[in-house]
Image: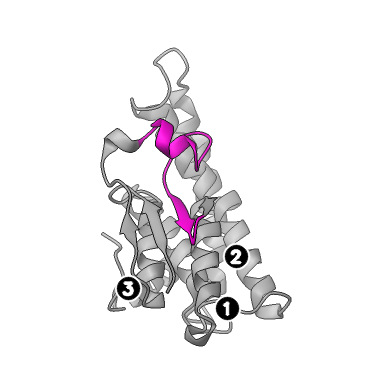
Amino acid sequence: MLNIQLYEYAQTRSARCRWTLAEAGLEYESLGNAREVFGSDELRSVQPLGKVPAAIIDGRPLFESSAICTAIADLVPGRKLVGPSGSWSRALHDQWVSFALTELECWLWSTELNTLDFSLSEEERVPDVARPNEVLFRRGAAALDAVLADSHYLVEDRFTVTDIIVGHIVDWGRADGLLGGFANLEAYLARLRAREHCNLP
């Protein structure tokens, strides 16, 4: 039996890992679902910056939500949540996850870091980045919206772990009020929310 432990917190990126575990039909042990775990020596032993999510899978540490979600999907090949290593399906998974992280999430995260008081000091924050970040996010969102005009999901037009990762990022943009005019992305989120294990807010 697999032994999966997860450092998590609420609707942070760890929510992607919880959803993936649910879709995979795997149980896990939570190693701390509280703000106190952030930056702790215990968490730093798994994630060098003391951030969530971080996981221990059969005694082996792993961090970054996309890596954890993909590893979980690999544990249950019968669920077909991700293509096998070396397949074209796997290459498309890597493509869309990389796209979402570099063309969507990074701009949302930059705005959050520079406008909220939780990571950078007031002297370190640059609130003016919010506007260009919005422009750059919407540029990436427009490209994704166009792709979803012709398909329901991103890889082989079926639900995969790719949609968990990308969907959470797109929903972050929705929460920030940045999806105006992107009907295909709104429909995509609606399809994801219709799934039994979806944990989008």
Identify the disc placed on residue 168: none
Whether tag 3 and tag 2 are in contact, CB under 8 A, the answer is: no
Q: Which residue is mark 3?
A: 190
Locate residue 112, reporting x and y percent. Answer: 40, 36
Query: Which residue bears the numbered disc 2?
Result: 96
User: Which amino acid is tagged 1?
Assistant: Val
CA gap, disc 3 and disc 2: 19 Å
The residue carrying pointer 2 sits among few (fewer than 14), some (14 to 19) or many (20 or more) residues within 10 Å by Cα, namely some
Label 1 belongs to which residue?
A: 155
**In front: label 3 or label 2:** 2
Which residue is depicted at the point 49% across and 62% down?
A: 58
- Residue 12: x %, y % from top left: 35, 48
SS of the residue at dot 3?
A: helix
Q: Residue at x 44, y 67 (%)?
A: 164
Span of residues in magenta: 38-59
Q: Residue furthest bottom?
A: 78
**Earlier sequence position, callout 3 versus callout 1:** 1
Q: Residues within 10 Å of mark 1 (few under 14, many from 20)?
A: many
Residue for point 34% across, 64% down: 28
**What is the CA distance from the residue labelled 2 to the residue labelled 1?**
9 Å
- Mark 2 residue type: Trp
